[in-house]
Image (cartoon, rainbow, N blue to C red):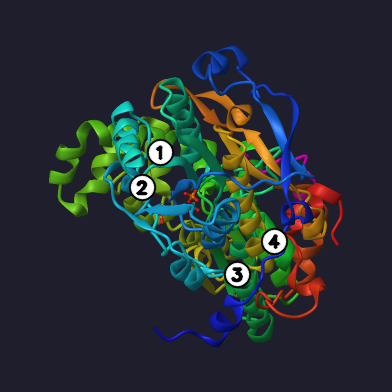
Amino acid sequence: MRKSALQIERADYTPKMPEVLKGNVQVKEGAATKSVSDEAEIAKLFPNTYGMPSLAFEESKGGMGLKQPINVGVILSGGQAPGGHNVIAGIFDGIKRLHSDSRLYGFILGPGGLVNHEYKELTSNIIDEYRNTGGFDIIGSGRTKLETKEQFDKGLEILKKLNISALVIIGGDDSNTNACVLAEYYAAINAGVQVIGCPKTIDGDLKNEQIETSFGFDTACKTYSEVIGNIQRDCNSARKYWHFIKLMGRSASHIALECALQTQPNICIVSEEVEAKQQSLDDIINDIATIVAKRSAEGFDFGTVLIPEGLIEFIPAMKNLIAELNDFLARYDTEFKMIKKSEQRSYIISKLNEKNSALYASLPETVARQLTLDRDPHGNVQVSLIETEKLLAEMVKNRLDEWKKAKKYNGKFSTLTHFFGYEGRCAAPSNYDSDYCYSLGYTASMLIAAGKTGYMSSVRNTTAPASEWIAGGIPITMMMNMERRHGEMKPVIQKALVKLDGAPFKHFAAHREEWAFETAYVYPGPIQYFGPSSVCDLPSMTLQLEQKGKLQ
Ligand code: FBP
């Protein structure tokens, strides 16, 4: 298969890793841990894996090879994120270092591969083809949820058949929650299989005191920021369009916020702020239209607006509407589908409660339709299918038309809309993600060698040079709390939303007024893989602000 010039050069890149992992290591145990809340319930649900100490690797004077080879399984779970292949390469190199006859098996297309016994052995030839590349195509990914005893038992059959004694699950908050439940189950039945998690998701919402960031966030944001910067330069050259740009991130607004820090757009909406201020859709439209009108009065009939994908579910009134629609469509799905398409809108309007009905009636036709599309397997509306960027552009236009009639505004307002998500999920990993992912994988193999289960691989201090990074493991139960899911209280890893009192948001809030009116665009350009470290190795601005309180 033909490879690009970059792919060929990049194959030879050696990921930087913590100094300590280059030699022999031993585990240093920290204090016993407890869950972020609901301690008693979580302790009861995880009697074998609750309260374990946090771990850090330190230099060992002794050897660390294994007497016997180990077989390890790996699963990629959920949405793609740049760097997944390097996690696998790190695991591979780690277990080969421990014993050259160790073997790595990849389960195909996500957790479903474990249950359906679909796998392939990942040999050095295969691994070498994928080092430092984006995507998850080495074994594919999937969204099957590993949660039932039947699935666990089915999985154990193939693990036993392949003599696999440890499984690494690379996934987001839900997949790592399931990894923890699996670790507990295998420990309870003495299955002889360890389970280790790795923090993945471009959304950046799997992080806490112990896990600095999820991998893929850095590359995805840099990829989107490059394109946003290009759009801004175009926008500032032609001076005739307002660009409404929706950015992926199912729930939290970390991606939109990071891209705003990188590119300094005129407007960036942060869903968590919308919710905290109890803003309505009308408030958001007014805020945007006010900035558009003010810029227009200065002669600037152009600009950029960043919109987080999950916005719609954070607007309290929309949340209520969606909840009623979810219930209604779950109950009357067949009846609804039998109604002529042209009459569906008025049918829904006649069935909803007064408030929701009025809100639904005020929405543009396309968005109203998107809200009634098929739900995901959990009955939730699929937010990535809702064209919020078009909704906002259209509603702002309507508001400006009203103001024009009232002689409050006299500008030109032409819009272009964009959605960036899939463009960045499989990008070639930045140096940060290449290094971080390789270290996460390598650390996972050291946790396996140390006989640990129910841990998430952790690499910290990543705003420092890689040699100073700290590698270790964090008990997954430590990140858990109880939340209502599908009507039942369940132990889950707490999702990290944007903190309004956190340094990244504060930095944005302190500058947004200036960015709104002064056209202070920044053009980050493409990710650089070769060149000065000051350009190639920079961590995300979110991480710089969180860790150091300032930008490097
Ligand atoms: P993960 O949390 O599984 O990493 O996925 C994140 C994400 O990319 C979201 O940003 C997006 O809403 C969703 O996946 C889209 O998923 P899909 O492509 O499977 O519809």
Q: Amino acid at mark 3?
A: Thr
Toward the viewer: 353 or 261?
A: 261
On the image, numbered disc 1 is attached to which residue? 322
Toward the viewer: 476 or 67?
A: 67
- Tell me if label 4 and label 3 are in contact, CB under 8 Å: no
Asked if residue 500 lies in the magenta stretch, the reply is: yes
The residues tagged by marks 2 and 3 sit, at their Cα atoms, a distance apart of: 29 Å
**Residue 151 seen by the camera:** yes
- Tell me if label 2 and label 3 are in contact, CB under 8 Å: no
> Residue 29's spot in the image, x, y percent?
74, 30
Q: What is the number of the mark on residue 371? A: 2
Specify which label sits upstream in the sequence, 2 or 3.
3
Relative to residue 378, is residue 178 drawn left or right? right
Q: Amino acid at mark 1?
A: Ile
Toward the viewer: 379 or 74?
A: 74
- Tell me if label 1 and label 2 are in contact, CB under 8 Å: yes
In this picture, which residue range is highlighted in magenta? 495-504
Q: Amino acid at mark 4?
A: Ala
Give the position of the C terminus as an image quadrant.
bottom right
On the image, numbered disc 3 is attached to which residue? 223
Specify which label sits upstream in the sequence, 4 or 3.
3
Mark 4 surroundings within 10 Å by alpha-carbon count, few (fewer than 14), some (14 through 19), many (20 or more): many
Specify which label sits upstream in the sequence, 3 or 1.
3
Mark 3 surroundings within 10 Å by alpha-carbon count, few (fewer than 14), some (14 through 19), many (20 or more): many
Specify which label sits upstream in the sequence, 4 or 1.
4
- Residue mark closest to the camera, 2 vs 4: 4
On the image, numbered disc 4 is attached to which residue? 260
> Residue 478's spot in the image, x, y percent?
63, 28
Relative to residue 481, is residue 76 drawn left or right? left
